[in-house]
Image (spheres, helix red, strand yellow):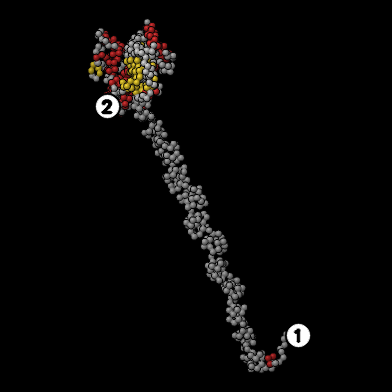
Amino acid sequence: MKHTFKIASLALAVAIAGCGGGGGSSGAAPSSKPKPTGTPVAGSAVKGPLANAAVTLYQLDFNADGGAGNQLDTGSTNGSAAFSGVSIPAGTTGDVLVEVQADADTVDLTTGQAPVITRLLSVTSAEAVANGETNYPTPLSTLVVKMALANADNTDSGFAGDDNGTVSAAEWTAALKLAKSKVRSQFGFGLLDDSVDLLSSPPLITSDQDDQEKVVKLRTAVEAVAALMADMAEAAKTENPNSTETADSMFAALSEDLNDGQVDGQSEGEVIATFANIADVAAKVTQDPSSLTIPGSNKTVSQVASVVAEETADTGVDADTSTAENTTTVIEPAETESDIDQDGMPDSSDDDIDGDGLLNEQDSAPYNPDRDGDGVVDGEDAFPDDPAEITDSDSDGVGDNSDAFPQDPSETVDSDGDGVGDNGDAFPQDPSESLDSDEDGVGDNMDAFPNDPTETVDSDNDGVGDNGDVFPNDPEETTDTDEDGVGDNGDAFPEDPNETIDSDNDGVGDNSDAFPNDGTETSDSDEDGVGDNSDVFPDDPAETVDSDADGVGDNGDAFPNDPNETLDSDGDGTGDNADDFPNDPDEAVDSDGDGVGDNADAFPNDATESVDADGDGYGADTADPDDADPCNPDPNATACGGPAPAVWNEFNWDEANWQ
């Protein structure tokens, strides 16, 4: 019977859709005003899937009543319960409130009847939609949005507001995250872990790529909430037949009750009127929902797996649903107080509320197990406030992701990318250098003398640095001991600034060597052009040779080859030593030693005579009685007129006759 009604309702919905009708718009003429361009929002409204419901998008204003700011667009869900004709206008940024409102045309595809919860809320963002994120308004997402809006400025129950009457973007973001955790823990019925997002995770099969087990569990929680609300409305009627409460009104009251952190039938200390006929709200909310009937259906909450599988025929999804059909769920009762780490200990008495491994007093955000939202709980996250970091392997305070040396506690950055950390890199901005062993400011790679702080360059590659090399561009020279401009290697006299060359290799430099090309000579003391070594008279510029070795130079020696003579004072060709008359050029010998030279001595061999004044052959001194008479004493004397004296060989006398 139910199935027949469902088909008929669906046919009606299709007919309405074919006439251009969506939720809340079947009686209105189509608008001729073109819709603004934008990004379509994908998703569905689900308690069961709601077909032909009105969908409205608002710019979220978390300081406005109900969170609705400027209206952005309107549309509907189609006959398959998918969003249709609703887009986020181009240029929109930030969070968007999604409102789904059932009207007379709306059908819950699970039951084929009008939905028992008629208004669903969710939140998305322009950026998320642009990135392809889907959105699924459900009773659970509605509880999340209402709780976040009610508590974003509060400081109680873990909310990060400041009670100043104005909600900041940061307060809203924190509140939305915490509200998801609280609702998931209280009305997740033990089925939902942190991987389920109550706003964007699908509670129905949308494709064969879905995690069907997760879909079944989320949908079970959604249907359990609706079943509890329907059961509470029935209980109110049982208690008071005049009660007009419905599952819808009970759900609104539950949301109000939940906002103060405790499901107890009160809101901020005041009894909620809707629960007037419910003797024990907490007991009703925490009953086992698995046996409750899905409102408008003959199936129980424990049978949601089959519902999810079967409804694909209505939603138009072609997928193998065997995984969903075979999913077994263990449904736990709802909680009156949040237990966001789902450890069985209510948050109010839990030493580690968020189960992140940090005790509340150690945790700056005890209700947020993952403050930076990087997927790692704070207690296991070395950087719980940095979404880019998780681990610090070397415990140096810098996360592994940004630590260029995650295993080295002494290094974190490698600015020049040379593989050496900045702390140990003497040149952190130079990829070609890392060490400066001698701390001279020049890296070892470029330093020709990496261990010598006084040297860095060896321009001539001679092994001596330019600073200490007097000849930095001459590989043959390094030192100039005497500072004469000539290197020691090429300087024959490296310690004598006055000398550099010894052309003749005689040990005396050319500058002071009078004979630079004569290895046998170095000095010419008398500057006569003859070296001292070969100059017999080195201090006498007039003499150089003493051929006869008589101590008198040849130039001044009248007899250079006669060691017995040096002077010829009278220039007669006879040396003074042998010249009995050295100052008389006419005489040289005095044979008879009478003081009269032989040339002038008429009797050179007679020391008693020297003059023959009358030429008679008799000396005037003693033998000639009359030196004026040539005939006295020998009248035969030539001088006396006698025969001329005989001359050898003028006569034919033999020697005997001569004698």
Depth-wise, is mark 1 or mark 2 nearer the camera? 2
Whether residue 278 appears in this view of the structure is: yes
Rendered residue at 30%/26% (across/down): 168
Say whether marks 1 and 2 touch (CB < 8 Å).
no
Kind of residue sitting beneath label 1: Asp
Residue 207 shows which numbered tag? none
Q: Earlier in the sequence, mark 1 or mark 2?
A: 2
- Residue 90 lies, in percent from the top left, at 38, 23
Q: Nearer the viewer, residue 317 or 36?
A: 36
Outermost residue on the front side: it is: 32
Whether residue 180 appears in this view of the structure is: no
Say which quarter of the image contains residue 645. bottom right
The 10 Å Cα crowd at callout 1, few under 14, some 14 to 19, many 20 or more, is: few
Rendered residue at 58%/71% (across/down): 546
Q: Is residue 72 left or right of residue 277?
A: right
Q: Nearer the viewer, residue 94 or 573?
A: 94
Residue labelled with disc 1: 654
Judging from the image, what secondary structure is the residue with disc 2 in?
loop
Residue labelled with disc 2: 162
Quadrant occupied by the C terminus: bottom right
Q: Is residue 435 left or right of residue 156?
A: right
Q: Is residue 145 above or below residue 598?
A: above
Q: Is residue 336 left or right of residue 418?
A: left
Judging from the image, what secondary structure is the residue with disc 1 in?
loop
Kind of residue sitting beneath label 2: Asp
